[in-house]
Amino acid sequence: MDQTVEKPQVQFSEGAMAEIRRYLSHYPADRQKSAILPILHIAQAEFGGWVSPEVMDLVAEILNIQPIEVYEVATFYTMFNLKPVGKHVLEVCRTGPCMLRGSDQLIEHLENRLGCKVGETSADGNFTLKTVECLASCGTGPMLQVREQFYENLDPASADQMLEDLKALTVRKPWEENY
Amino acid sequence: MGRKLLTEHINVEGIHTFDVYRKHGGYASVEKALKTMSPEEVVEEVKASGLRGRGGAGFPTGMKWSFLAKPEGKPRYLVCNADESEPGTFKDRYLMEKLPHLLIEGMITSSYALGARTSYIYIRGELLYVLRILEKAIAEAYANGFLGENILGSGYSLDLHVHPGGGAYICGEETALLESLEGKRGNPRNKPPFPAVWGLYGCPTVVNNVESIATVPWIITNTAAEYAKFGIGRSAGTKLISAGGNINKPGVYEIELGVPVEEFIYSDEYCGGIWKGRDMKAVIAGGSSVPILPKELILKTAAGEDRLMTYESLSDGGFATGTMLGSGGFFVMDDQTCIVRHTWTLARFYHHESCGQCSPCREGTGWMEKVLHRIEHGHGHMHDIDLLVSVAKQIEGNTICPLGDAAAWPVAAAVRHFREEFEWHVKHPQAATAPGAVFNKAESVLA
């Protein structure tokens, strides 16, 4: 009987697995579950910016825990996208301090430029627009985050420039060369 | 210019690298502690300095350390709380990004004091780029013999790791942070037992804020007596203030505790005054959780004394007329700010971040957000204003962790000090929901 049939269909690349093993080495041998959040971040970078049920099952297999233990964590922490997203996810901070510096106007501008509302993906598939709560960038608002990068002190002109730059950008993974 | 204890060299080129940091006196506290002091002496020194936790609660750091249980055969842990998520606060991000080795030095010296052999820095997941800066610096510290086996030939060994969170404000609460570090949902634990007895993996653990740990090197290198010379009374030393909102010069400022609030806001050395030539309406002085104060009460206490940037002066008058220094997240609102809308964004934040474990917080934060939303959008009733106060009161003190209080205080304080503005929204919904409309006290009296 072919055992591989029951294994998750997705697999991590060798580069991602090296990162995963590095994190696993940080925790006691009987506490490997601690690596769940680091591995979910790696998974999100590896598999197109979101984590599918198959990917969560794969994480559970690596950690030798029940899939539910991964699901309950992935659904609690807001950074993990549980549905497919565009090439770039724009996460705009909208909490009080950023509101004082113009986040309402920035969100409106981006909705107009992208032709989609918060929570949606632009028709060309390039951008998913999201709002998030405070990103610890209150002195440089309004601002947003794309993957690990902060774009700060945004006005309509610099936001437009950012969109152009992102469209042309080749997305790399943290463990790849030239990241 | 006030003396800088943490950030003196922050603008030196290459200070994020081991060699440059070392050239400017870096890692001196590790050498001094490991070669000439016992762990107990390091704890006593931090106790004597008067350093208070810089994450927000202001609990004396040395005293927290002295509570750590030391049972035989169990490891002890030091965990740095780098989950900086309190709206208005961005000082730890700045410190870690610019001076990663200062935090690492503090972690080594503090871990030695506590007898920890493995320590973690729990950083909020949104700051993965800072995690990479820290990991690079940690690798340099290992390569130079300041981490790993037998540090500087002292016989003391330490491993240090950075752990990313996943985007949950609640993980800034220390027991939620520990749950998260164990790979679980960030639900706060009931206390007692406190982490000092039952912390990470059921072992004795100390959780300290980034800035607190980054202050330890200066104290050990220069002595507690020298540190205590800075500041006023029980507000010893310096504090990093994240200055934001409608000011001319937002940024992180290291101030000696005791600077007058008025000087902090208006002098060019700090915030540089209110932007666009406007007047100031209100300030939130210690992160979004602390009570908002109107201009007159942030500049002077109810007794008419100058308000100072200290734990004691900012809390003078209790919540009736005072506030808290908190995390030092200081944000200023100009006279064009709608207090109702701003309070709504904060209520939405706490609703979003409630872990859902305790019903007063889970339900109450949702109610406050909804009621504020309808007042802000012109559908409010007069009794909604008292409803907000009532809900806030029923959350406060009735939850496992302080998130409930943190959600209740800003709403209660906004109604306490700006009730007329809430009433104006209810009475004049059309005017209040017009684009850019802001309550004007003088005009409102005429109307």
Image (spheres, coloured by chain):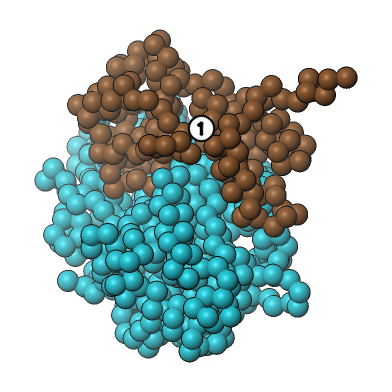
- Quarter holding the C terminus of chain A? top left
**Label 1: chain?**
A
Query: What residue is at 58 percent from the left and 42 percent from the top?
Result: A18
Query: What residue is at 27 percent from the left and 22 percent from the top?
Result: A164
Secondary structure under tag 1 reads helix
Residue B163 vertical position relative to residue B7 in the rendered view, above or below: above
Q: Amino acid at mark 1?
A: Ala
Residue B329 visible in the current orientation: no
- Between residue B151 and residue B215, name the one nearer to us: B151
Query: What residue is at 75 percent from the left and 78 percent from the top?
Result: B72
Query: What residue is at 38 percent from the left and 78 percent from the top?
Result: B28
Residue A60 vertical position relative to residue B23 in the rendered view, above or below: above
Q: Colour of chain B?
A: cyan
Q: Is B252 positioned to the left or the right of B147 in the image? A: left
Q: Is B90 positioned to the left or the right of B397 in the image? A: left
Q: How many marks?
A: 1
Quarter of the image where one finds residue B140: bottom left
Q: Is B72 positioned to the left or the right of B17 in the image? A: right
Image location of residue B241, percent across then percent down = 32, 60
Image location of residue A36, percent across then percent down = 64, 43
Image location of residue B89, percent across then percent down = 38, 53
Q: Residues within 10 Å of mark 1 (few under 14, many from 20)?
A: some
Residue A24 visible in the current orientation: yes
The residue that disc 1 covers is: A45
Q: Colour of chain A?
A: brown
Image location of residue B292, percent across then percent down = 36, 53
